[in-house]
Image: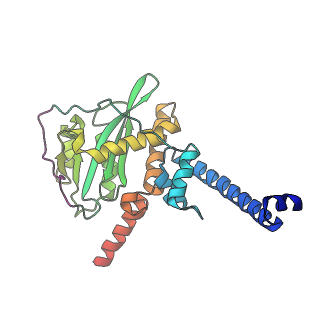
C-alpha cells in the first residue's frame, strides 16, 4: 500500500479517507434506493419532485437527486387517454362559473369528471370529485355502467359529507350527461351552483386528476377484478390525499393543506 501511495503521489491516510467516503456514498445511495422503492409501492408513478419533497434525502440537493433519479431508471412517461366517457350533446347547459374565478377557500369550487378503466374485455368507470383549492379528492365511485345512479350521484353523496350548511360550492364539470340528469340535478338543487365547460379544455384539473389516479396508481396496482378495482381506487384516493405532496400547495399533501386552511379560518373567527 505504501509503494502504491508513493507511486500516485498521495498518503495512505488520504487513500483510506477516499475509500471511506466512497463507501459512505454507496451506503447512502442504497438507502435512498430503498426509500424510493418503498414509496413507489404505494405511489407507483410519483414523479421526481414529489419524491424529493417527500423523502428530503440528506446531503443531496434537488438537482443532484433529479440526476440520480434519471440515471437509476425511475423516470415515468405520460400516458394518454383518448376514450370519451360523456355525451355533452344534451339540451341542459350551465354557464362556466369558474373561468377567471379567484380561489380563496376550500369548498368554494369542486371539479369532477368520469374516466374509463379497461379490465379484461370490458370497461368500468371511475368518477372523481376534487376540491380545486385544496386538491383533496372529496368523493369517488367505481362503477360498471355510466348511469348517474352509479357514477356522479354516489360520488357526490360521499363528497357532501365535507360541506357545511352555510357553504354552496360550485360544482364544475365538462357537461356530460351524468351531470345534467334529472336525478343529479335534484340532488344538487339548493346545495350547489352547477357549472359546465363546453369542452374538456375547460375542465383541465379534473382531466389531469383522472390521468393521475388511473395511470399513476390503479394501473400499476394491476387490479384483476371489479372488486379489486374498487378497493384500489379507495387506496389511490387515500395515497393521493394523505401522502402525495403538491408543488402548488407549498410541497404539502392535500389533506395537510386543507387542515392548515381550516385552522387559519378558525383563528380569523
- Residue 160 vertical position relative to residue 202 in the rendered view, above or below: below
Q: Is residue 9 above or below residue 144?
A: below
Viewer-side residue, 79 vs 28: 28
Residue placed at 36% from the left, 41% from the top? 210
Left of 113 or right of it: where is 121? right
What secondary structure characterizes most of the magenta part? loop
Residue farthest toward the top in the current orientation of the protein = 121
Identify the residue at horizontal 48%, vertical 42% (top origin).
76
Residue 262 locus on image (x, y percent)? 34, 68
> Would you place residue 220 above or below residue 3 in this image?
above
The image quadrant where one finds the C terminus is: bottom left
Q: Is residue 100 magenta?
A: yes
**Percent position (x, y) of residue 205?**
30, 48
22 and 95: which one is in front? 22
Find residue 26 and report its image quarter: bottom right
Residue 203 in percent (x, y) is at 25, 45
* 124 vs 66, nearest the viewer: 66
Give coordinates of residue 86: x percent, y percent.
Answer: 25, 33
Quadrant in the picture for the N terminus = bottom right
The stretch in magenta equals 90-102
Q: How is the image coloured?
A: rainbow
Q: Quarter-wise, where is residue 132 in the image?
A: bottom left
Q: Is residue 147 magenta?
A: no
Identified at 83% across, 61% down, the residue is 5
Q: Is residue 182 above or below residue 159?
A: above
Q: Which of the 4 quarters of the picture holds residue 144?
A: top left
Amino acid at each position: 500500500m505504501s509503494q502504491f501511495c508513493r507511486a500516485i503521489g498521495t498518503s495512505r491516510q488520504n487513500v483510506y479517507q477516499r475509500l471511506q467516503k466512497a463507501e459512505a456514498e454507496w451506503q447512502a445511495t442504497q438507502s435512498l434506493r430503498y426509500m424510493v422503492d418503498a414509496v413507489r409501492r404505494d405511489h407507483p408513478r410519483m414523479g421526481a419532485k414529489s419524491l424529493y419533497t417527500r423523502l428530503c434525502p440528506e446531503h443531496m440537493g434537488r438537482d443532484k437527486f433529479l440526476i440520480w433519479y434519471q440515471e437509476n431508471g425511475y423516470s415515468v412517461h405520460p400516458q394518454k387517454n383518448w376514450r370519451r366517457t360523456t355525451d355533452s350533446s344534451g339540451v341542459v347547459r350551465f354557464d362556466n362559473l369558474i373561468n377567471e374565478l379567484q380561489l380563496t377557500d376550500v369548498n368554494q369550487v369542486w371539479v369532477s369528471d368520469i374516466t374509463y378503466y379497461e379490465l379484461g374485455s370490458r370497461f368500468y368507470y371511475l368518477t372523481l370529485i376534487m376540491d380545486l383549492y385544496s386538491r383533496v379528492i372529496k368523493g369517488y365511485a367505481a362503477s360498471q355502467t355510466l348511469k348517474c345512479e352509479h357514477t356522479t350521484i354516489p360520488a357526490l353523496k360521499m363528497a357532501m359529507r365535507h360541506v357545511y350548511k352555510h357553504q354552496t360550492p360550485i360544482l364544475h364539470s365538462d357537461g356530460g350527461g351524468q351531470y345534467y340528469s334529472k336525478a343529479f340535478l335534484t340532488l344538487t338543487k339548493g346545495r350547489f351552483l352547477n357549472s359546465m365547460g363546453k369542452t374538456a379544455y375547460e375542465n383541465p384539473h379534473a382531466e389531469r386528476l383522472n390521468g393521475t389516479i388511473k395511470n399513476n396508481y390503479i394501473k400499476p396496482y394491476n387490479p384483476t377484478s371489479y372488486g379489486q378495482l374498487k378497493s384500489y381506487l379507495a387506496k389511490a384516493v387515500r395515497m393521493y390525499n394523505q401522502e402525495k405532496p403538491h408543488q402548488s400547495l407549498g410541497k404539502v399533501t392535500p389533506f395537510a393543506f386543507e387542515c392548515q386552511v381550516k385552522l387559519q379560518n378558525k383563528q380569523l373567527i
